[in-house]
Amino acid sequence: MLTVDLDAIADNWRLLRRLCGRTECGAVVKADGYGLGAAPVARTLSAAGCRRFFVATIEEGIALRKALPGDRVIYVLDGPMGRGCEALLDRHALIPVLNCPEDVAGWAAHARANGGRRAILALDTGMARLGHSPAEARALAADPARLSGIALDFVMSHLACGEDRANPMNEAQRRLFDELRTLLPPAPASFANSAGVFLGGGYLYDLARPGAALYGVSRSTGALTSLRQVVVLKGKILQVRLIDSDSPVGYGATGRVPSGACLATVAVGYADGYFRALSNRGHGYAGGVRVPIVGRVSMDLVTFDISAVPAGTVRPGDEIELIGDRHTVDDLAEEAGTIGYEVLTSLGRRYRRDYIGGTPAEDRT
Ligand SMILES: *Cc1c(COP(=O)(O)O)cnc(C)c1O
């Protein structure tokens, strides 16, 4: 069972907003709110005062539009995604991020034919991923009529190494962003993701776009202050077994327990995003005791060695805590050799999501 603490998300947003000072603090709720439910997360943050939201795809934007009051702004990071999507963006009041000259040409033509449209212009300052390259940005700056009809809400870029404060990439990206921005028609600027907010100072500009930190990811966002944990994940114990002779455990017999060990088999597996990489490496908490995974994580099941738990105190039907205050999203990520972002966005559809606090239900007041 997956419990999502919406009040903790709102508190994390308020903490980031405080760090933002006079910079507006938006929220990134792509990938269904980093796996936790974009609609309840966004409704909660909207009630807390957040006015600008980012999703990755138009489909995510359409779903989010239904959950938010009409005055909340929704930006689509992937942009207009080719011809024909302009009407869809308009119909659902979604504003695209323009990532390339083709995006600008298409959206500008649409804007001129319809009395003007808003957009964000994205510049790539060092990721070679999305956004206008420096050469494309300079070409656009030399021919600003290509933007006519478009009102730029923001010019934006994205940090590659923001969680590493000492990385010279951060300053190099910021300098390139400033250089390109001054060539372009004046517009507010947006640069900082979660890590950028923690960098602070000159990285904040006019609008911050934090995602992961809202959801309690600290380790890969360079968080300086402690964030509230948002997720509690518990797995149900199906079987408890006392081992009466040395025994291999699980597929491939990669785990082994001695006679006298006690195992608990839990109904969670890699099909739920409980990574196979946790095999013989991950941990949980049973009856308040830290217990290791033994053997391979299989599709629907994982086995913990609960020998350290006083006999008889943990029974079938009880739960083992897989993620919580004692064993955070970051801890699990480290055991699995990944980052908190991937742990969250992999949380399985089979988990029932229970919400605490916040504004989980339809409420447009
Ligand atoms: C995902 C994303 C963010 C949010 O990043 P976090 O590291 O989760 O805070 C901000 N901006 C862009 C362009 C993104 O793709």
Image: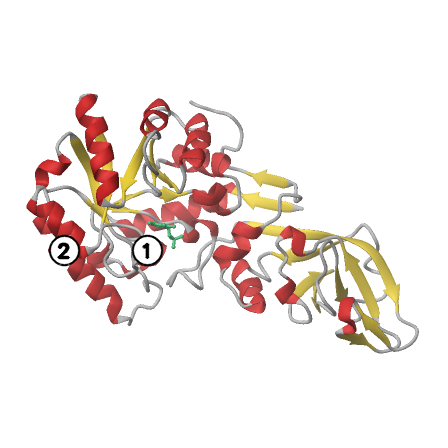
Mark 1 closeness class: few <14, some 14–19, many ≥20 residues within 10 Å = few
Question: Label 1 sits on what residue type?
Answer: Arg
Q: Which residue is mark 1?
A: 129
Taking depth in this image into account, of 112 and 62 the one nearest to the observer is: 112
Give the numbered dot on residue 318: none
Taking depth in this image into account, of 96 and 327 the one nearest to the observer is: 96
- Give the number of callouts: 2
Of badges 1 and 2, nearer the viewer stands: 1
Q: Earlier in the sequence, mark 1 or mark 2?
A: 1
Q: Secondary structure at mark 1?
A: loop
Q: Are marks 1 and 2 in contact (CB under 8 Å)?
A: no
> Residue visible at 26% across and 39% down?
103
> Residue visible at 67% across and 63% down?
284
Mark 2 closeness class: few <14, some 14–19, many ≥20 residues within 10 Å = few
Give the numbered dot on residue 178: 2
Q: Residue furthest right?
A: 244
Taking depth in this image into account, of 20 and 142 the one nearest to the observer is: 142
Residue 134: x and y in percent read 17, 56
Question: Label 2 sits on what residue type?
Answer: Asp
Query: Does residue 137 show up?
Result: yes
Q: Secondary structure at mark 2?
A: helix
297 versus 94 height, above or below: below
278 versus 153 height, above or below: below
Distance between mark 1 and mark 2 Cα atoms: 19 Å
Residue 218: x and y in percent read 44, 60
> Residue visible at 84% across and 57% down?
239
Residue 293: x and y in percent read 71, 67
